[in-house]
Image (cartoon, grey):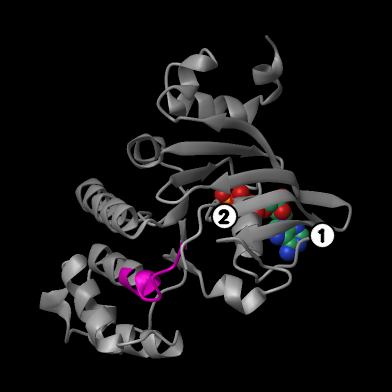
């Protein structure tokens, strides 16, 4: 089915833990083929937001639509259009790369699993590791397998929580290029969290800065610092983290 609306639409989303708001009324969207960075200091509400989009945490209020499908009303349809990758969600190390991808492909109900696994092995340069146990691969290789696994169900929305954490700069750059390539070709929307501002400048079309559960700033990571009188995205990040009110003054 082809839809023309956003891949992800989040409306006035809130999550409170007791009296404390972790996410406090955020509204944003991710368009087809767009990579949006979800940025903010520790505790800003990024993981809480991603957990609600993944359906593992129930919002206190507000709504989430994935490819036009309301997560609250048509949960399994919405989640079938979503995928997720993070280093803290590793794959079983005692299965080979090919076994891991096949098992997850079957779990996801992917049609013609064998062909899909072959295509992703080639796309992510994993053919030489097809019969290698996943647990013995380097961090960079394991990250490519994790991305391949996340792509198995051809998700419309890809959620990446610090996908290049723990990778050396060269391997991280190569992985970014590969993710960009696959996302552009498949027209996916990507929500990407990172604490690496250079990475964000390189990979994200747009960024959202969260602070205390609210979106404080939104824009192009290459022009946003200048618009707020800061020399770099990193300077802007530090301002958001340390003195967010400073940005609200003219
Ligand atoms: N289960 C919970 N119970 C109570 N408070 C929670 C719970 N989970 C998260 N919080 C609080 O909600 C706020 C947002 O946390 P969250 O993990 O979403 O931040 P984050 O932006 O992902 O941070 P980090 O960059 O450190 O991963 C924090 O103040 C955190 O202490």
In the rendered image of this protein, does residue 242 appear above or below residue 188?
above
Question: Can you give x and y, in whole percent of width and height, for residue 144 in the image?
Answer: 27, 66
Q: Residue at x 51, y 16 (%)?
A: 227
| Cα–Cα span, label 2 and label 1 | 19 Å
Question: Can you give x and y, in whole percent of width and height, for residue 176 in the image?
Answer: 29, 50
Mark 2 Cα-neighbour bin, 10 Å: few <14, some 14–19, many ≥20:
many
Identify the mark at residue 8; answer none if there is no mark.
2
In the rendered image of this protein, does residue 69 appear above or below residue 241?
below
Q: Nearer the viewer, residue 57 or 158?
A: 158
Q: Residue at x 24, y 72 (%)?
A: 120
Magenta-tinted stretch: 148-156
Of helix, strand and loop, which one carries label 2?
A: strand
Q: Is residue 127 a member of the stretch shown in magenta?
A: no
Instruction: Point out the frontmost of discs 2 and 1.
Output: 2
Going by the picture, which residue comes out furthest to the top?
250
Question: Can you give x and y, in whole percent of width and height, for residue 58 in the image?
Answer: 74, 67
Which quadrant of the frame does ligand 1 lie within? Answer: bottom right
Location of residue 221 (image quadrant): top left
* Left or right side of 148 for 33: right
What residue is shown with label 1? 60
* Left or right side of 131 for 62: right
Of helix, strand and loop, which one carries label 1?
A: loop
């Amino acid at each position: 089915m082809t839809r023309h609306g956003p891949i992800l639409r989040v409306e006035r989303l809130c999550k409170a833990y007791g009296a404390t708001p972790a996410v406090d009324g955020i509204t944003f969207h991710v368009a087809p083929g767009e990579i949006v960075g979800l940025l903010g200091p520790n505790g800003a509400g990024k993981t809480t937001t991603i957990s609600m989009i993944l359906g593992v945490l129930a919002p206190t209020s507000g709504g989430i639509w994935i490819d036009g499908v309301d997560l609250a009303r048509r949960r399994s349809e919405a989640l079938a259009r979503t995928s997720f990758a993070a280093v803290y969600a590793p794959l079983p190390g005692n299965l080979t790369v090919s076994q891991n991808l096949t098992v997850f492909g079957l779990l996801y109900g992917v049609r013609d699993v064998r062909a899909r696994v072959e295509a992703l092995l080639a796309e992510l340069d994993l053919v030489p590791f097809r019969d290698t146990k996943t647990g013995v691969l380097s961090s960079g290789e394991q990250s490519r397998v994790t991305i391949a696994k996340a792509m198995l169900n051809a998700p419309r929305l890809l959620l990446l929580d610090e996908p290049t954490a723990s990778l050396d700069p060269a391997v991280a750059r190569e992985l970014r290029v590969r993710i960009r390539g696959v996302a552009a070709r498949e027209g996916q929307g990507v929500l990407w969290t990172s604490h690496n501002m250079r990475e964000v400048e390189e990979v994200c079309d747009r960024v959202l800065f969260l602070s205390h559960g609210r979106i404080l700033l939104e824009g192009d990571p290459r022009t946003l610092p200048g618009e707020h009188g800061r020399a770099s995205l990193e300077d802007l990040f530090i301002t958001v983290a340390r003195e967010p009110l400073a940005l609200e003054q003219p």
